[in-house]
Amino acid sequence: MSLRHMILYIGSITLIFLVGLIIQDQLNPYILRVIINTGIAIILSLSLNLVNGCAGQFSLGHAGFMGVGAYVSAALTTRLFPDSLFQTIPGTGLAIILGGIAAGVAGYLVGLPSLRLKGDYLAIVTLGFGEIIRIVFLNIPFIGGAVGLAGIPLSANFFWVYFWVFVTFLFLFRLIRSSHGRAILAIREDELAAELMGIPTAKYKVIAFVLSSFFAGIAGGLFAHYQGFIDPNSFSFIRSVEIVIMVVLGGMGSLSGAFAGAIIVTVLPELLRVFNSYRLVIFPLLLIVTMIWKPSGLFGFREIWNFFKRAPKTS
Amino acid sequence: MQLLLQNIINGLALGSVYALVALGYTMVYGVLQFINFAHSDIFMLGAFAGLYVAGWISGIFSPTVEFAIVMSASMFFCVICGVLAERVAYRPLRSAPRLNVLITAIGVSLFLENLGQIVFGSDPRVFPSLLPVISLLEAQDLVLNNIQVIVISVSAAFMFILSYIVHRTKIGTAMRAVSYDIQVASLMGIPSDWIIIFTFVIGSALAGIASVLYGLAYPRVDPLMGVMIGLKAFVAAVFGGIGNIAGAAIGGIILGLAEALVVYYVSSSFRDAIAFGILILVLLFRPTGIFGTMQREKV
């Protein structure tokens, strides 16, 4: 890592911290809430983008991994070690990372067998795994069962959420430009050809799946420690579909698209509150219309910075 | 022993409903190669259509006639919705990648669910008991009533009709041709767009029948009822080998039986997990289902 990058990263994190300090008290709590929820959504859509967009697989069980992260981290801070270092801010951070690791392990266990399948079958198996994870939580009384788990310390704030948004973005940004990332993209373009070029496709698919699950778990942990309450229904099939909508709307395989999709899916329903319950119908319509008229989503495979790049070349 | 028998009867009744819904999935998959997620919501709309029609005509006719009218109305409504979904959402995507069609199907499904919650309200309603419940057989623990018999026999009858249409009529032959290769079928003069619509007509009609039968046996109707039933019916279709009509019917019945037995012997909270457990086992060990044929990937 060069000095320039180091300064850039530390500068960005400081900026997030300062912005967090300012808006934590100044901003309307409702708007702050929407902004934080958007941050969590961005982590989810960025991470799903790695599997659905970059690797070209189709996972429909992302909410399940988010649930693993949320439940593991919340169980650590609330049930297993209620009066320990997990109550402090770094302790919660550690719990959230452990939740992410647990989600990554779950992703490995799910991905290893199911990534032999393709397309619709993979979608339906990941959906099945997501639902099974949810049903397992439903049947463990220790973490609340169907009632849910309440009293989780509210330690996730603007800074922590956007810190993780930054980390996720940076990680994926660097990953896609590495040789490992190129291998993952090659699988999307043509799996058979990639295999023939000597890329261990199975390995890279599992890597993509595990990383994606890890970040989903982080998002889950942040969600749990921001809401203070989780129940199995927070991680249902509908939530997975919501994340898929973010990725598809933004453009599969585009990081800026993942940002745009997450912002649209989280903020638009708030703006549409005037339409009351009809806003629920607008979303699916948006999805259908996007698929028919702009199947590649808002950004397609492109990134926002590519739009500006071309200008000097032609002039 | 009697309890086991009772559970088998319950499982058969549930399984035949799954089988009817699974047929709709498998036929659309056979022709267009995508999972019609909206099929489960067509099922839900059928149940609501039945509920409203039963309310309007209650007391005018004898129970049997009423049952027939409600069922036809529900079938009719489902057919309209199914064909509309095909025409508006799926046809523009005929040449698009399969993933796009799959996402559109999820969109249509969410649209119908959310619209259902607005139009019908999200509270569960009670499906009217169209037919008086007559107990046919009562031993100590074993109860067999006419509803269970009707559910099983009506679904069996429609499955035979379907099998006749697909294997013995001209339009059925055309359907099989389209599912084999849509382009070659078009070159042979088969109007593939009409055959696809016909496939949706049959699938949706079966969903309508299934919804009324389900309403008779489990009189609880709400806008999200289709989600779980749809997923399980899809599992049944995959289990039998997707695209295979006999497979879907058998898969549905096996799934219903498995669910009834799990609820009885293990716990009712695992009733939804068993379907997915079966799904995962099938896909891992025999991805093409029990009756499916292997397809080799071509370069």
Image (cartoon, coloured by chain):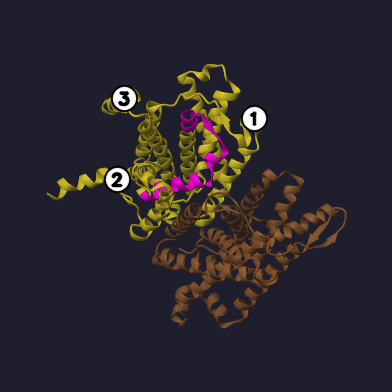
Chain colours: A yellow, B brown
Instruction: Give the residue at mark 3.
Output: A26
Q: Amino acid at mark 3?
A: Gln
**Chain of the residue under the numbered disc 1 shown in the image:** A
Earlier residue among tags 1 and 3: 3
- Above or below B251: residue A109: above
Residue range (magenta): A221-249
Instruction: Tell me if A246 is positioned left or right of B292 in this view.
Output: left
Residue sitting at the far top: A84
Q: Amino acid at mark 2?
A: Glu
Mark toward the start of the polypeptide (2 vs 1): 1
The mark found on residue A303 in the picture is 2
Q: Is residue A212 magenta?
A: no
Residue at 36% x, 56% y is A290
Nearest the eye: B203 or B280: B203
Q: How many marks?
A: 3
Q: Main secondary structure of the magenta part?
A: helix
Residue A170: give x, y in percent of width and height. 35, 34
Amino acid under label 1?
Phe
Classed neighbour count for the residue bearing mark 3: other residues with Cα under 10 Å, few (<14), some (14–19), many (≥20):
few
CB within 8 Å, label 1 to label 3: no
Q: SS for tag 2?
A: loop
